[in-house]
Amino acid sequence: MSRAAIKANPFSQLLGMQPLRLPKATTAYVVVEGKRVTDVREIARVLRVHPSDPLVLKLRRELEQARSRARYQRQRQDPEQMAKRREWYERNRDQVREYRRIYDEENRERINQQQADWARAKYRADPEPLRAKSRAYYQRNREAILQRLREKKAAAKAAASEAAE
């Protein structure tokens, strides 16, 4: 299935659609009172409160988490690290595939549910491509579909007449 972006609209929550996610950032900062804060010491100064204030501690934690995520993203996108991961994968390909097979077996229901949710959200966001595909299938297989329906109707009619007797 293609990873087409699901367009956000006012009815997304009602339709059970997931919000779009932006790519992970490689830099980190926090905005406090409309000012960009890059240093934890600036937080208390901008808010004009004591450094041990709970809000300052919360914002400090958020800034540290943002920096940690940014550091991780920079390391992940580093060409040297990417090459090391690729080499490791080549050496351990069989183990990775075995792990993936076991994981898929153990989580089959959850994976199927996620895929169904994704397909449903994609359809709700733009139903026309699937409808066009369905119409094209019907046109290609019209006679076989109608024959199956006739047979099904005849079988139902025969079952009804046997039940009436």
Image (spheres, rainbow, N blue to C red):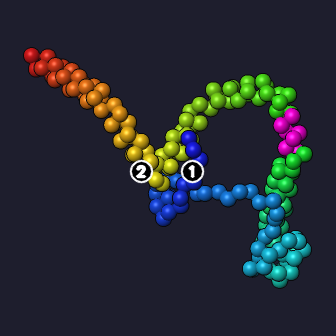
Horizontal and vertical percent for residue 129?
Answer: 44, 48
Tell me the tag on residue 4.
Answer: 1
- Circle 1 packing at 10 Å, graded few (<14), some (14-19), many (20+), is few
- Which residue is found at the position 78% from the left and 79% from the top? 35
Say whether residue 25 is left or right of residue 142: right
Residue 82 belongs to the span the image colors magenta: yes
Horizontal and vertical percent for residue 77?
Answer: 83, 51
Q: Name the quadrant of the C terminus.
A: top left
Horizontal and vertical percent for residue 109?
Answer: 56, 33
Residue 70 appears in the figure: yes
Magenta stretch: give its range: 81-87
Tell me the tag on residue 128.
Answer: 2
- Which residue is found at the position 50% from the left and 58% from the top? 12
- Circle 2 packing at 10 Å, graded few (<14), some (14-19), many (20+), is few
Q: Is residue 123 above or below residue 7?
A: above
Disc 2 marks which amino acid?
Glu
Q: Residue furthest bottom?
A: 48
**Majority secondary structure of magenta residues:** helix
Q: Name the quadrant of the N terminus.
A: top right
